[in-house]
Amino acid sequence: MYNFEFVKPATIADAAKALGTEEAQALGGGQTLIPALKQRLNAPATLVSLSGIGEMKGVCRADDGTLAIGGATTHVTVASEAAAHYPALAALASHIGDPAVRNRGTIGGSLANNDPAACYPAAVLGSGATVKTNTRDIAADDYFQGMFTTALHDGEIITEVRFPVPQKANYQKFVQPASRFALTGVYVAKFADGVRVAVTGASENGVFRWTEAEAALSADFSPAAVEGLTVSADGLIRDIHGTPEYRAHLVKVLTKRAVAAAA
Amino acid sequence: MPQVSMTVNGKATSGTVEGRTLLSGYLRDHLGLTGTHVGCDTSQCGACVVHVNGAAVKSCAILALEADGADVATIEGQANADGSLNVIQQAFQDHHGLQCGFCTPGMVMSAAALLKENPKPTERDVREYLEGNICRCTGYHNIVKAIMAASGQDVTAIAAE
């Protein structure tokens, strides 16, 4: 790993200031970034740790009924503290990576990285959550812009994520057993005004909504409702673990499982 | 050069490190605590698991400076005060939970973290908890058996497959 200057500010304001310097990079839990730095895939001049910012940690129910999760909150904390408010989200967090990863990795870090096979993007897009940064609010539908690409500007910090809490929800992950990432994962959330279905791990463009399934499930929230639909393999990921056709098949199977588990 | 201080196995330590120094490097190269093993360069193998403020973490995936002020526990601090093996270590010996032993420090530290939060885990709980700890020798069966035994459960029904 190339050397860098390490700073650990205690406030969002100080972190934003530190990230304003040239070639500065934010560090969440480091469970992706540190391995990437070790591979010399990245060479920041300054690494700005977000782990010392108390105002970015924790889970609470906001006055408007949404669930607010600080950007520097670890997966293990979401798994325990979100359980009473939003069980599907807590369950997703409790199966990210492995225990040591969950003790360090953060929701903000995962979303800023936007790995095409990460779990949190499916929950955020599937819930229609809002990504709050130090400068603005970004709707999930605008936030994810492709593999490892987001609406974040350089130096922008995810301070909080606001989740509307659905009536029912479930996440089904078909685990790639070596990496623990999703070979394909589907998040289904049923709200009073409709159903959202978000798919991770499958597309070369990262997480996406399966809108045909959303329409079918909004009319009839049952596994049978998506039986007649087909998922196109165009633009899906081909790698040693699975073909685009295999992933397309998984999208439907996992959607049905998620609906069955949520119902 | 930055200074770092942390408590390691109950003793105050401090040293001069670089920004890029990993906690695993601080423990091994600065403190000479080479029981924490580094088995991969990709943060996947789990041989380097230590406890930071009580939580299991991969010491090769956290900067030493991130652990400044922390309370760190490594395999060197696991034995009983009289030097005898603790209950988890003894169970690994009794149930042949290792062959080459390279992954063992991480396995023991993960097991200790598991048993602290879940004192009577099921076999499945143990296997799920060890997802981030890779062993190339044992096929895991005897590791799982050792951890079950360390939790005080009867393991006679668990076959040594």
Image (spheres, rainbow, N blue to C red):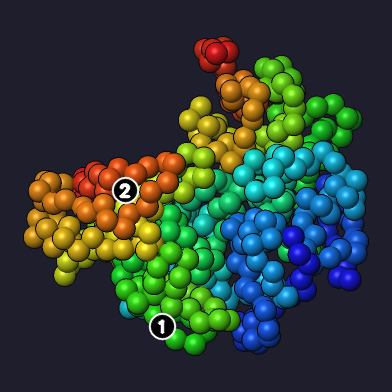
Residue drawn at (48%, 78%), measured in percent from left and top? A152
Q: Is residue B71 left or right of residue A232?
A: right
**Mark 2 burial class by Cα count in 10 Å: few <14, some 14-19, many 20+:** some
Q: Is residue A180 left or right of residue A195?
A: right
Q: Is residue A45 above or below residue A38?
A: below
Residue drawn at (55%, 53%), measured in percent from left and top? A102
Query: Visible in this render: residue A227?
Result: yes
Secondary structure state at the residue bearing disc 1: strand
Q: Is residue B49 left or right of residue A227?
A: right
Q: Is residue A254 left or right of residue B77?
A: left
Q: Which residue is mark 2?
A: A244
Q: Position of residue A229 (x, y in %)?
A: 13, 51
What numbered label is drawn on residue A238?
Answer: none
Q: Which amino acid is tagged 1?
A: Asp
Q: Which residue is mark 1?
A: A137
Secondary structure state at the residue bearing disc 2: helix
Name the N-terminal-most of marks 2 and 1: 1
Please state the chain letter of the residue tagged with numbered disc 1 in the rendered image. Answer: A
The part of the image, by quadrant, that contains residue A121 is: bottom left
Q: CA distance from mark 2 to mark 1?
A: 34 Å
Q: Position of residue A41 (x, y in %)?
A: 64, 62
Number of labels in the image equals 2
